């Protein structure tokens, strides 16, 4: 992270003047990461949103993240600079289909990945992120669990909790779904001393090749703590920028094709305009906010 350019400086000035905290996901473009107050994964940002002292949250991420921030902090104004920055996986499950599936499995708890719409969260028992999915499912008394929408995350949770029956939904993150064994093996051939870290949204054959499976925040912790100096990063390539900034002296090999176009839609100009206009603002129906609050708070309470 270098010196801020004039646009970045103006963004920081406006944020201070207007009592705005800027949150940015690890997959955001570097120049947006550089102006954020907090960079993190979904779990970290959800927690920080609830503790922010500022009256306004500007969320640089995809739509469901801004919705979750609003549900957890309904008294705050939440701004999402580019409404078109949406998560395709979040829209791979709809309320009607979920309710039919619940009827087929009446004793099962419903665990909604945070990568879902606010409507889906309101029809779930508890939420999870990739960082705490195993802990969340392990905390439930029910032996049968419906996980939506990511089938790969659900399969990973099942592999870690054989005593649970995890009912999978056919959704996926296209970025992680498209990471292949061949890609990882090719990188490993080029960098034989590098440890392989992959995201639990990857397919199980890729996960089986990994030295560590972790959320993006978990990847950062592992890189800091590991004695290894070199890593192959099996997730969206934007994380490598943060890793390079926060873990100097170590080398991170990104997968050049692992790009989320929706995470890259937010540019500095969009952030500046959002601060000038104080919008676009996230609005949620009070009933949806209430329906989201409990599953999200239950998630945050899992230790």
Image (cartoon, helix red, strand yellow):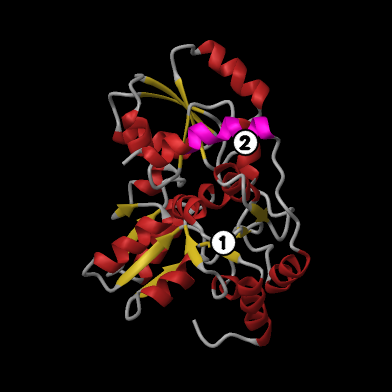
Question: Residue visible at 38% across and 43% down?
Answer: 132
Question: Residue visible at 29% across and 61% down?
Answer: 222
Q: Predominant secondary structure in magenta?
A: helix
Question: Considering the image in quadrants, where does the C terminus appear?
Answer: top left
Is 229 in front, or is 217? 217
Position in image of residue 239 (x %, y %) = 47, 65
Position in image of residue 15 (x %, y %) = 63, 71
Q: Can residue 210 be seen in this view?
A: no
In the depicted structure, whether residue 281 falls above or below residue 231:
above
Report the span colored magenta: 286-296
Q: Any magenta on residue 292?
A: yes
- Callouts 2 and 1 close, C-beta under 8 Å: no
Q: Is residue 262 visible?
A: yes
Say whether residue 207 is left or right of residue 45.
left
Is label 2 in a helix, a strand or a loop? helix
Q: Nearer the viewer, mark 2 or mark 1?
A: 1
Distance CA(mark 2)–CA(mark 1): 20 Å
Position in image of residue 164 (x %, y %) = 33, 24
Is label 1 in a helix, a strand or a loop? loop
- Check the image and name the residue furthest to the left: 227
Q: Any magenta on residue 155?
A: no
Question: Residue visible at 28% across and 24% down?
Answer: 163
The crowding category of the residue bearing disc 2, from other C-alpha atoms within 10 Å (few below 14, some 14 to 19, many at least 20), is many
For label 1, the residue is 54
For label 2, the residue is 289
The answer to which image quadrant residue 143 occupies is top left
In the depicted structure, whether residue 123 falls above or below residue 198:
above
């Amino acid at each position: 992270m270098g010196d801020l350019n004039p646009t970045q400086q103006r963004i920081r000035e406006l944020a201070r003047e207007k009592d705005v905290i800027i949150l940015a996901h690890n997959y955001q473009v570097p120049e947006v990461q550089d102006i954020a107050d907090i960079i993190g994964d979904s779990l970290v940002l959800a927690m920080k949103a609830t503790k922010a002292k500022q009256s306004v949250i500007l969320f640089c991420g995809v739509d469901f993240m801004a919705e979750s921030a609003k549900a957890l902090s309904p008294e705050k104004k939440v701004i999402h600079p580019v409404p078109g920055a949406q998560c395709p996986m979040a829209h791979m499950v709809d309320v009607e289909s979920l309710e039919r599936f619940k009827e087929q499995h009446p004793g099962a708890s419903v665990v909604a990945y945070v990568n879902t719409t606010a409507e889906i969260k309101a029809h779930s028992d508890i939420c999870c992120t990739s960082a705490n999915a195993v802990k969340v499912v392990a905390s439930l008394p029910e032996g049968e669990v419906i996980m939506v929408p990511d089938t790969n995350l659900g399969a990973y949770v099942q592999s870690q909790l054989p005593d649970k029956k995890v009912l999978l939904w056919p959704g996926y993150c296209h970025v992680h779904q498209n990471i292949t064994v061949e890609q990882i093996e090719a990188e490993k051939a080029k960098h034989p001393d590098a440890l392989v870290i992959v995201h639990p949204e990857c397919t199980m054959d890729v996960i089986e090749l990994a030295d560590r499976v972790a959320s993006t925040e978990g990847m950062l912790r592992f890189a800091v703590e590991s004695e290894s100096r070199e890593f192959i990063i099996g997730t969206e390539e934007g994380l490598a920028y943060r890793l390079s900034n926060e873990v100097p002296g170590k080398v991170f090999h990104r997968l050049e094709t692992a790009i989320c176009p929706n995470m890259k839609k937010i540019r500095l100009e969009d952030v500046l305009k959002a601060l000038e206009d104080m919008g676009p603002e996230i609005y949620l129906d009070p009933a949806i906010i209430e329906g989201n609050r409990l599953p999200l708070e239950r998630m945050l309470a899992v230790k």
